[in-house]
Amino acid sequence: MSTGSGGGFQDPPAEVLAEAAAAFGLLATPARLHIVWALAQGESDVTGLAERVGGTLPSVSQHLTKLKLAGLVRSRREGRRQVYLVDDPDVVMVVRLMVGQLTERAGHSGHPGRSARNPVRLRELGA
């Protein structure tokens, strides 16, 4: 793989890399990734998300606040409920791709011993 300028790709500006790293950093916790995954399937209120991801209302609410401040999710008022949804379709695409690929590889990787204690390693995926 070529890293020089002749490879057809230019390095992104430092501020773009910093923004991408911040977004990936927010998604680096399983709880927040699960929340974004759930919201990628459809909007939900905090109670529904807490039930789905197995978190407490306060912890899910804190995660949503961080994701909202980062611009990854947004909310709207629906009567007395606050409904959350993913605000960036590109984030949905990246999360679905990564989680979908890892799920597929874990289930069909030819490694029968895969489990939560023996996960697929990114290095094994060619990353």
Image (cartoon, grey):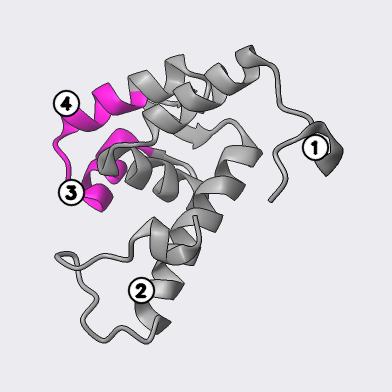
Which residue does the numbered mark 2 point to in the structure image?
106
Between the C-alphas of marks 4 and 2, the distance is 32 Å
Q: Is residue 54 magenta?
A: yes
Which secondary structure, mark 4?
A: helix
Q: Amino acid at mark 3?
A: Gly
Q: Which dot, 2 or 1, sits closer to the camera?
A: 1
> Relative to the observer, which residue lies in front, 79 or 25?
25
Which is nearer the N-term, disc 1 or disc 4?
Answer: 1
Instruction: State if disc 3 and disc 4 touch (CB < 8 Å).
Output: no
Which residue does the numbered mark 4 point to in the structure image?
58
Tag 3: Cα neighbours inside 10 Å, few (<14), some, or many (≥20)? few
Between the C-alphas of marks 1 and 4, the distance is 44 Å
> Relative to the observer, which residue lies in front, 42 or 90?
90
Between the C-alphas of marks 1 and 3, the distance is 42 Å
Between the C-alphas of marks 2 and 3, the distance is 22 Å
Residue visible at 23% across and 42% down in the picture: 50
Residue visible at 14% across and 65% down in the picture: 117
For the record, the magenta segment spans: 45-64
Which is nearer the N-term, disc 2 or disc 3?
Answer: 3
Which is nearer the N-term, disc 2 or disc 1?
Answer: 1
Which residue does the numbered mark 1 point to in the structure image?
9
Quadrant housing residue 32: top left
Q: Amino acid at mark 2?
A: Ala
Residue visible at 45% across and 73% down in the picture: 104
Q: Is residue 26 magenta?
A: no
Q: Amino acid at mark 4?
A: Pro
Which secondary structure, mark 1?
A: loop
Which is nearer the N-term, disc 4 or disc 2?
Answer: 4
Instruction: State if disc 2 and disc 4 touch (CB < 8 Å).
Output: no
Which residue does the numbered mark 3 point to in the structure image?
54
Quadrant housing residue 106: bottom left
Between the C-alphas of marks 2 and 1, the distance is 31 Å
